[in-house]
Image (cartoon, grey):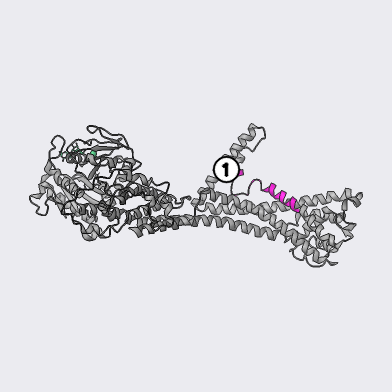
Amino acid sequence: MSWSSAAAQADQPVTTGEPDNVVEPDQTDDAAGDDAAVRDQAPPADQTQPTDQAPPAGSAEPSEAVSAPEAPASDTAPSAPQAPSAPQAPSAPQAPTEAHVRVDARLLEAALLNLRKRIAAIPLVFEISGSAEVKAERTKLLSQIDDYLLPRVRQSAAPVLVALVGSTGAGKSTLVNSIVGAHVSMTGVRRPTTNSPVLACHPDDIDWFAENNFLPTLPRVRQEGLARPGRDGLLVLAASEGMPRGIALLDTPDIDSVVKAHHEFAYQFLDASDLWLFMTSASRYADGPVWEILQHARDRKASLGVVLSRIPQTYRGELADHFNAMLDANGIAAENRFVILETPLIDGMLPPDAYQPIRDWLADTATRSDRRVAVLSQTMSGVLDTFKSRVPAMAAHVEAQVVLRAELQRTAEAAYERAFAEANAGLKNGTLLTGEVLARWQDCMVGGDLRPRRGGKPAKPTKKGKRARRGPSHNAALEGALRSAIESFILSIADRAAEHVDGSWRGDPAGSELLEDAAADRARGEYAKQIFESAFGTGGAEPSEASQLTAFSRSSPDLPLRAARAVGAWQEHLVRLAEADLRPGAKRISFDDESLGLVVLVAMLGEDAPGADAPATEDRGASIYTEPRRLLASVFGTGMRAGILAKARADLIHRVRLLLDEELLRFVEVIESAGPCEDVAAIRLYQAEYSLEAVR
Ligand SMILES: Nc1nc2c(ncn2[C@@H]2O[C@H](COP(=O)(O)OP(=O)(O)O)[C@@H](O)[C@H]2O)c(=O)[nH]1
Ligand SMILES: [Mg+2]
């Protein structure tokens, strides 16, 4: 490690102006980006092959992977003019580079595209804890793939992009201008509103940056003449003969800006760069934002150079040592550290001895293939290494979403399963045969309305006269009481189930949010319906009723109607059922249709009631539980009675099941409205990351 400074060289023997960033063999050995880097030497066909012919990359769906529609079209990349292969110093060692040709860049690209596709497709439908962070992380991962990894893999010979970042006022723009030898970047300007980075490179390299393969979504403009204030969010491309070939210097927007957008914008550039040159000044180096960036660089394992500027001559050693110690204490392994002493500017430029070591180092990085390989490998490996934990973390979050979805669904299903069991029990244990139903039954008994009569079928022609006038009113009253008892019973259990699901979903913030959204949707739909209805004079609910109609804590507003229809249809069916059984017996005594339906219904509702099976005795007399069974047995016999009751029950239960299923569906629809959320998304994500690791 050495501090390289023209001024320091005299008394610091270790600093020769040649930064000691010599490639360690093992530094490149394991590096994933090696191939991308060493492909400078690969046959041109290797670089220009359209990637849709790429082999599977070990992915589950390779062909999909490379044709991923959301990925930038891979076949546009090779059309970019190949940067002239970086001139190689004759002394550059060839052996280490040859060793890394083993990584197939096409496989790497295919694996990256596959991963990109899987990341873009992850379902983030529920607002569970951490989902906001995962959304941000997804954006970040995608931009790292799009802005850096894919362009670098596709164009390994492209110039090395150096992002100059750091404290505002440290002299970044001044350094860029000095290295270039022209005023390409505005200096001394605090830019609270403008946020326009400048990229300086040799004119031979400019085409590569003009193409949209680097930071594809960023608009760019070529600089004509001298630097002018740029426009927010626009990349200014400054071509200058003064820049060494094979390297581009990006004067980034202020990373310590208080404007969050500037800040994020600047980090996007860092993520897209091969090498970070961090610059801070003697007066700013202890500031928080400085260390935030440096820690980011450390975590990313990006290639990093550090410049400490504007150091007063008198404190040179002291300040450099302190900054150095801080870097070490923070685990910032910047191999290349430079100092620039405070010096008067000449025409806004640093004197050559102040910037020359930095310029030489940059030029060397561009031209010496070992150094270039090391820089590209380290940064690319650094990014890919972070994927090893970030992608599985994202997959785990997807799994949590899937678990939540299943849980919500299970809660709803269980509630309606319980409701169904309740319905089953309540429709035979006699609880409905009380109150109004019992009173009306007794009226019928007293009037003898339900008794089977000679001739039975057809009931109507022989049952005219007195009974016809008297009976139907009792029967109708009993029927009305039964219907409303059954309907309100079904309603009450459905309401309870809805209340339970609503309550337990609301216990979870994600469930609560789902219900709120769905209720708002429904209210909007209901409101639109009301406007439509009032416009066409069909009336409609009061606005205040709209929310009632859309509440999930109660059963659907149309359930009473559907329940009434279901019970009505069942009663009609009941008569046909009983008749079908009756015919073979050819009884002479039977019920009329209406009575038959009522007797079967009452018998069925009391089938499991206590004592329903006991024969009526003198002392106990006939009850609503025993009498209908006796009446049925007198006509059909006990065996057939059991058959009729079983069939009637099965049919009613089936209808109740349909009603409850439809109620459950409301909740299922709410879950589905959140969007698809399949556990296969998490598996694919794990697989894609695994495939990527396999080709590194
Ligand atoms: N005297 C002197 N002034 C400098 C030096 N570096 C930068 N400046 C001045 O400091 C101000 C900020 O420099 P600039 O390059 O715009 O800093 P940036 O915000 O990091 O890009 C400008 O007015 C420069 O002229 C230096 O080494 N010596
Ligand atoms: Mg500046």
Which of 283 and 403 lies nearest the eye of the viewer? 403
Please identify the dominant SS of the magenta region. Answer: helix
Height in image: 298 above or below 617? above
Question: Which residues are drawn in magenta?
Answer: 547-570
Residue 622 in view (yes/no): no
Residue carrying label 1: 522
* Relative side of 615 to 6, left or right: right
What type is the residue that disc 1 sits on? Arg
Residue 696: % across, % down: 32, 58
> Is the residue indicated by label 1 positioned so its CB lies within 8 Å of ligand 2?
no
Task: Return the x and y of residue 620 as percentages of the image width and height.
Answer: 82, 65
Indicate the position of residue 429 as horizontal and vertical percent values: 72, 61
Q: Residue extending furthest left?
A: 10
Secondary structure, mark 1, is: helix
Tell me which residue sits at (13%, 42%) in the image. Answer: 342
Callout 1 crowding tier (Cα within 10 Å): few <14, some 14–19, many ≥20: some
Q: Which of 69 and 536 is in front in this view?
A: 69
